[in-house]
Image (cartoon, rainbow, N blue to C red):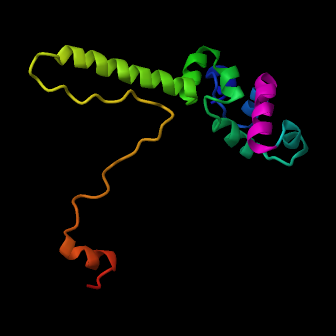
């Protein structure tokens, strides 16, 4: 206990740790508050924004926030990759095309079928599952399933 801000970099615990974090990264947190919530640190100082809410707000800031960039300068490249900008999407597409081309060249004239190439993981994209159920419903039972027991 008592480790707080100095012990673990970027750790945000109680109100004392929040005060230390605001004193060090106040400008970045103020900018994030203005752009994302329409508030400022003055609202917190006046009591319009309570400390628990500010702690939750700061903890929820992602790698695209000013606070994260100020607190973790060594992660600047990672934050740029995660933000999902057009340049990042183009680079990921180029990686996919190059991998497909190299695999195609490797399997040319071998008589073997080229394996399916998994797309490069895009951290900003939500993962979609194409599986919705265990098995399809037979057409004879569809009306009963769709209308909830009525045939």
Residue at 69%, 41% in the rendered image: 57
Q: Is residue 32 magenta?
A: yes
For the C terminus, the quadrant is bottom left
Give percent across and percent down for residue 31.
79, 31
Residue most extreme to the bottom:
150
For this rendering, which residue is in front, 10 or 85? 85
Q: Quadrant of residue 45?
A: top right
Front residue (pair 102, 123): 102
- Foreground residue among 107 and 3: 107
Decide: is 45 above or below 75: below
Look at the image and tell me whether residue 36 can be seen.
Answer: yes
From the top left corner, tell me how far across and down residue 44 is, in percent.
84, 41
* The N terminus, quarter of image: top right
Q: Does residue 20 appear in the picture of this structure?
A: no
Horizontal arrangement in the rendering, residue 82 relative to residue 135 (left or right): right
Residue 105 is covered by the magenta coloring: no
Could you tell me residue 120's position as x and y percent? 38, 27
Image side of residue 35 versus residue 122, left or right: right
Tag count: 0
The span shown in magenta is 22-38
Q: Residue at x 67, y 30 (%)?
A: 65
138 sits left or right of 100 in the view = left
Quarter of the image for residue 52 reads top right
Question: In which quarter of the view is residue 148 placed?
Answer: bottom left
Residue at x-position 23% and y-position 14%: 105
Image location of residue 66, percent across then percent down: 71, 27
The residue lying at 64 percent from left, 16 percent from top is 73
Magenta region's main secondary structure? helix
Return the residue found at the far left: 111
Q: Nearer the viewer, residue 130 or 43?
A: 130
């Amino acid at each position: 206990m008592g480790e707080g801000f100095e012990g673990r970099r970027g750790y945000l615990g109680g109100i004392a740790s929040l005060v230390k974090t605001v004193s060090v990264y106040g400008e970045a947190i103020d900018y994030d508050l203005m752009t994302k919530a329409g508030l400022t640190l003055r609202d917190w100082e006046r009591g319009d924004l309570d400390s628990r809410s500010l702690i939750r707000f700061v903890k929820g800031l992602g790698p695209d926030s000013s606070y994260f960039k100020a607190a973790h300068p060594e992660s600047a490249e990672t934050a740029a990759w995660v933000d999902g900008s057009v340049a990042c999407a183009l680079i990921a597409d180029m990686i996919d095309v190059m991998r497909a081309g190299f695999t195609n060249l490797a399997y040319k004239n071998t008589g073997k079928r080229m394996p399916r190439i998994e797309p490069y993981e895009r951290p900003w994209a939500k993962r979609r599952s194409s599986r919705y159920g265990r098995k399809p419903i037979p057409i004879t039972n569809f009306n009963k399933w769709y209308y909830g027991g009525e045939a």
